[in-house]
Amino acid sequence: MSGKVLLVTGGSRGIGAAICRLGSKAGYRVAVNYASNKAAAEALVAEIEAGGGEAFALKADVGSEADIMAMFGAVDRACGGLDAFVNNAGIVDVKARIDEMSAERLERMMRINVVGSFLCAREAVKRMSTRHGGKGGAIVNISSAAARLGSPGEYVDYAASKGAIDTMTVGLAREVALEGIRVNAVSPGITDTEIHASGGQPDRVARMQDMLPMKRAGTADEVASAVLYLLSDAASYITGAILNVSGGR
């Protein structure tokens, strides 16, 4: 393979898949991570290849450090380096108040959304940082407007996990600013993807869109466009930023 390398966690569906498609169009070789839906990941790889791009699928659960290490090792072997990384994989749970949440739910939420994102960022930095012999790169974390809004009565735990991502974005950006790495986040609002159904609210987009300033949900492509901008040289002086893609919410 030749060209710059982009790894996207949770890349087989929704926002992640849109990032992979736009990344390929921007000239990246794309590593599509998935946790369980092999068919979706392979279909996306086939779509990218049919369009003249280069991609491959990597199974890994970002809630497992061993899986994360294996995933980055596979990218090393296939591509010999990493230029861009998107921390996209994450979960949401069913609607619940805090006084209804179990320890198991909270531990799973934080293990995948927070600890997994930290560990993935760690491995990306080890490969990109000039301190570690790398040639620099860019990281984009996928946050959520929930980090600002709190998601009361729905999933405060998810909102808190994304608040941690915002803090990590700012801190890591400053930590590696002199090592050739830019770190930013995109914070989507209500976006029309499958994540709402996975949280037991398949009608959430239709139910909430009239309450949004623009009276519509965002699309995965609109979020992906913001991600690709932050990965690009056009954003060369942007680091530590959290870009709201929330239609004014």
Image (cartoon, rainbow, N blue to C red):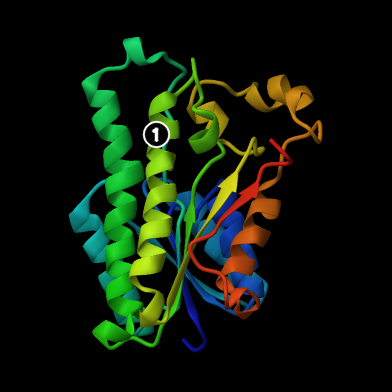
Identify which residue is drawn at 67% across, 72% down.
51
Q: Quadrant of the C terminus?
A: top right
Query: Is 131 left or right of 7, judged from the image as shown?
Result: left
**Disc 1 designates what residue?**
160
Of residues 72 and 37, the one drawn nearer to the viewer in this rendering: 72
In this view, 102 is above or below 64: above
| Residue 182 point in image, percent of width and height | 46, 72
**69 left or right of 248?**
left
Kind of residue at badge 1? Ala
At a point 42% along the width and 57% down the height, the residue shown is 169
Q: Residue at x 41, y 37 (%)?
A: 91
Depth order, front residue of 132/220: 132
Residue 110, placed above or below residue 143: above
**Is residue 102 something one can see in this rendering?**
yes
Q: Element under label 1?
A: helix
Quadrant of residue 87 within the rendered picture = bottom left
Can you give x and y, in whole percent of width and height, for residue 144 in the image?
53, 41
Q: How crowded is mark 1: few (under 14 residues within 10 Å), some or many (20 or more)?
A: many
Give residue 54's position: percent from left, percent from top: 54, 77
Residue 74 in view: no
